[in-house]
């Protein structure tokens, strides 16, 4: 084991020895290879050990919400560390295990300086989920209320028909507007003959 003055000298020597990180895991969603925690640790930890550096992982911070990765140079008792927030997707032990494992991997990569290509992340970035198409906005509430009022005030079937045909198609498509038209039509059809305008046939809308 080589003696070094401090953690920085030991880490510099280790960085000259770090080999290639083997991608030993497969992401089934993208059918691609990526380097997981074990792949990174198999390269970083033995190399640091040969330089007299121990690797520690432990949870810290408020409510143990951070995973700290620490490189400690034994002979000089100097150290460097990196804190990664624990983002737990599922509130159970499996979710915690996944978060801590990923945080340890990020900590090792950050402190050691190695940068394995992460096909898992690259593929996810290249293939983002397609956003759902936005539904077209309906007509303003004021236009709907005005249409309903006009239909309610129609004093004959002819007037009701004219008002209905003049309404914009999006307003006519609103269920409450159509219900208002149907309700007023029924009222006019059942009104006393003196209150109705004579017409040859029914209003051609339904």
Image (cartoon, rainbow, N blue to C red):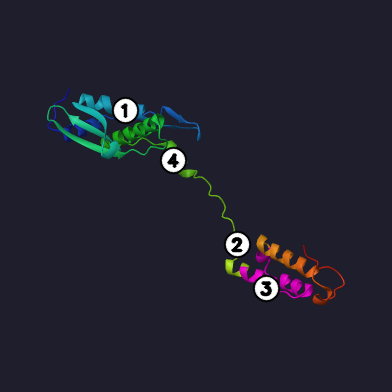
Q: Earlier in the sequence, mark 1 or mark 4?
A: 1
Which residue ends up furthest to the right in the rendered image?
200
Q: Earlier in the sequence, mark 2 or mark 4?
A: 4
- Would you identify the image quadrant in which residue 75 lies? top left
Residue named by callout 1: 41
Q: Earlier in the sequence, mark 2 or mark 1?
A: 1
Q: Is residue 180 visible?
A: yes
Which residue ends up furthest to the top in the rendered image?
1
Residue named by callout 4: 122
Give the spatial CA distance, label 2 vs label 1.
56 Å
Residue named by callout 2: 138
Between 122 and 13, which is closer to the camera in this rendering? Answer: 122
Give the spatial CA distance, label 3 vs label 2.
19 Å
Where is the C terminus found, in terms of image quarters?
A: bottom right
**Image depth: mark 1 or mark 3 in front:** 3
Which residue ends up furthest to the front in the rendered image?
192
**Image depth: mark 3 or mark 2 in front:** 3
- Magenta span: 145-172
Residue named by callout 3: 150
User: How far across and how far down the image is residue 146, in percent?
Assistant: 63, 71
Q: Earlier in the sequence, mark 4 or mark 3?
A: 4
Give the spatial CA distance, label 4 vs label 3.
58 Å
Residue 37 shown in magenta? no
């Amino acid at each position: 084991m080589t003696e070094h003055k401090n953690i920085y000298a030991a880490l510099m020597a280790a960085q000259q020895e770090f080999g290639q990180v083997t991608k030993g895991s497969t992401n089934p969603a993208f059918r691609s290879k990526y380097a997981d925690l074990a792949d990174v640790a198999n390269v970083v930890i033995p190399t640091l050990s040969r330089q007299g550096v121990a690797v520690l992982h432990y949870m810290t911070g408020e409510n143990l919400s951070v995973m700290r990765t620490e490189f400690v140079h034994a002979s000089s008792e100097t150290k460097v560390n990196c804190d990664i927030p624990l983002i737990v997707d599922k509130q159970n032990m499996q979710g915690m295990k996944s978060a801590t494992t990923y945080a340890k991997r990020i900590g090792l990569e950050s402190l050691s300086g190695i940068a394995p290509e992460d096909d898992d992340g690259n593929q996810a970035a290249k293939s983002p989920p397609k956003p759902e198409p936005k539904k077209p906005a309906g007509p303003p509430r004021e236009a709907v209320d005005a249409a309903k009022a006009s239909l309610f005030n129609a004093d004959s079937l002819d007037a009701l028909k004219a008002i209905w045909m003049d309404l914009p198609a999006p307003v006519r498509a609103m269920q409450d507007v159509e219900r208002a038209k149907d309700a007023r039509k029924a009222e006019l059809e059942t009104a006393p003959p003196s209150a109705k305008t004579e017409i040859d046939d029914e209003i051609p809308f339904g």
